Amino acid sequence: MAGPEFEVPKLTEYTDVPKIKVGAMAHVKSFPAAEVTQKFLGYPWTLTDDWQERAIGRMGELLGKYRSLRVFMDICVHCGACTDKCHYFLGTADPKNMPVARQDLMRQVYRRYFTLPGKIAPWLVGAKDLSKEVLDDWYNYYHQCSECRRCSVYCPYGIDTAEVTMAGREILNTVGMGQKYCSEILTKVQKIGNNLGLPGPALEDTLSGLEEDIEAETGVAVKMPLDVKGAEILFVTPSADFFSEPHVESLIGYAKVFHAAGASWTLSTSASEAGNFGLFNGSYETMQKIAMRIRDAALELGVKRIIVGECGHAWRVAYSFWNTLTGIGYGGNDPFSIELQKQLDPRFDQPMHICEYTWDLIQKGQLKFDKSLNDHRVITFHDSCNVARGSRMGDVPGGQFTIPRNVIMAVANNFHDMAAETIGEGTFCCGGGGGVLTDDLIEVRVKGALPRMNAFNNVVQNNGVNFLSLICAICKAQFTKVLPYYGFDRSMVGGVHQLVSTAILLD
Amino acid sequence: MTSLTLIYIGLYYFAAIVLIGGVAYRIAEYSRTPAPLKIPTTPAPTTTGGVVLRMAREVVLFESLFKSNKWIWVFGWMFHVGLALVLLRHVRYFQEPIWFVVEFVQPYGQYASFAMVAGLLGLWARRFLVDRVRYISTPSDHLMLALLLGIGASGMMLSFVSHTDIIALKAFALGLVTFDWQPVPGDGPLLVHLALVALLMIIFPVSKLLHAPGIFFSPTRNQADNPLETRHIAPWAAAAERK
């Protein structure tokens, strides 16, 4: 199926702030969700007759349940600080892709139905009735947001558009306007165990095939254990790691690290997915159900530790939300939390990121590398948004930036960071996060990648960089698809543990 | 007592009740609404002390805005600091004897009004000159700036051009807080100034001015980054879990 025609933006040295082009992306509409999956998730699949009432009702409920939404609807002063911060605005020039304008799609309705000035003088405060046109705008533009939170860094009040987008999508689902891509993934992960819909036997097959490949290549019998009861570590990784390129190269890297450390570890069929698209759709209940698979697997297998693979939003959910949603973590004194805490080894962070695990082993001198094996690569590192702005690694704030880079520099000789304002907390999204990683949104994805591509192009031109390393399954999939649009080779993308895999010495 | 005085006394009690009651209501509303998930924008402080410092930097220095846009920061900070000094200076009209801090700030407070007005003009110019900001500006955004500028300009008139009977004004203001009502001085600039201030107080709880109390409730700024050590759970989520 051929996608719609569109012009790929030109690469420039700096990402210029464009003049606004009203309606530039109004034609982009993600495919709607079908009956089967929406039914499974408990949402209607066509616009309900009472959609207006339903939408306002659901909005009221969310306003009562989420302080973020409640406060963010009130406190924006329209200062404009966020207007040039979103990669989708920078790449498309559509003013509704400015964070404040995206929020205002909901705020205009909030003001009309929930505030006094909006009720008596809507024209004065930019309040609007919830019409079908407004709802369609929501659908279009809440699926042109990757919930990357870059705007929240720069807002003087920390207003996070991701929270608004999530609420918007939840309301859209409630009235029967779900998105096909997220709806299908949320169904697959709950019915089959992972986002790709890879059943247990296929997974087993894939893993044994990979074991053979590694042994053929290295002469060492590196194992990828599955569903091993009594293993010390439950390893949870995005399902893309099992058979997408370049993801699988990192999976091989994790296995080699576990092997070299002599660790007792296992994957789980029922928890064969670290990703949790429940986050993207703003449904606490769905996110919790999906996260509970990890807890259940941990209890069933009797593991002492839980480690998470290279996946941005999965790490945000694991680090920031698992304790809340599933009791994986510490500090809970209710029976639900205590049941799991009794089992987990309190000497370790629960959960732990694979980069923290590997870095810890490196510091202890338990891993041996030949860094020169990575000498054909000149590497840069893309901070994935959910890791950068929604989580942490290590003991100090900002560990999520230093630890992956430390790992890279321990296994490779050539490393150059991209421009400072495009990494760290100000990192630009890959353009495919937050539930927009679908072919029907390819125009959004390509244009949204522009700021990252500009920064990448600069280090390619000036420093000879030829490898874009990162720790997120969505970023990997997005970049392999989008790099060719900008004239780069898709094999320039790979995981940090792909680099580890190349340099590690096994015995 | 003239009807003019009665109108202004009534106006100020009404405005004070709306402001205090309205903001208290909003604060109660924000406090009551739980934040079900840990969503600090990271890197974030890991301790409560760190959060207090982060919030202090936001409120006093506008740290995030500084990272974001230097023009908005310059104008916004000038306006807010100017306003803070001006407000502090105005405390003198409500107390006798006058607190030494208010005495100290008196000369600065008078000139701070220039910073305040300059900041407002800068912010307003952006609403016309920057296409992105023009796109998002609503009539209320413009009127809010007009109102604040009106307050600043009328106040400066009183300070620097046509002085009002300051003794009588202080008697009026003190009378309001001690319920010993005195006549309001009748000059035009003063009456305009007082009316606009009352209007600002009245619209405060239903306008974007709620950013002032609201920032303290912003979960991306007021949460500590410690989700692994403490289990954070909202009452409604805990209730659902027990089912």
Image (spheres, coloured by chain):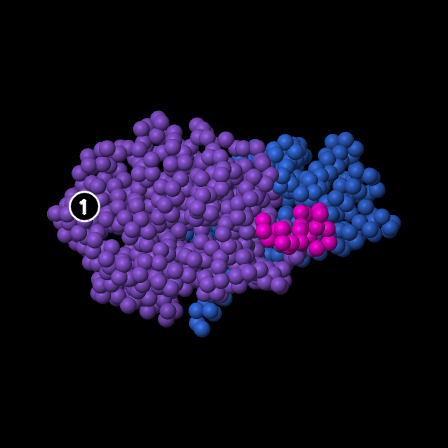
Q: Quadrant of residue A271?
A: bottom left
Name the residue: 35% across, 27% down.
A461
Residue A248 image offset from top left, x and y in percent: 27, 48
Residue assigned mark 1 = A367
Q: Is residue B74 visible?
A: no
Output the letter for the chain in blue. B
Name the residue: 55% across, 60% down.
A46
Look at the image and give the residue range highlighted in magenta. Answer: A118-137
Q: Quadrant of residue A321?
A: bottom left
Output the letter for the chain in purple. A
Q: What is the chief secondary structure element of the magenta stretch? A: helix
Name the residue: 51% across, 57% down.
A178
Residue A184 image offset from top left, x and y in percent: 43, 58
Name the residue: 57% across, 53% down.
A71
Residue A247 image offset from top left, x and y in percent: 30, 47
Give the residue at the far front of this rendering. A1
Q: Label 1: how many residues lie within 10 Å, few (<14), some (14-19) or many (20+)?
A: some
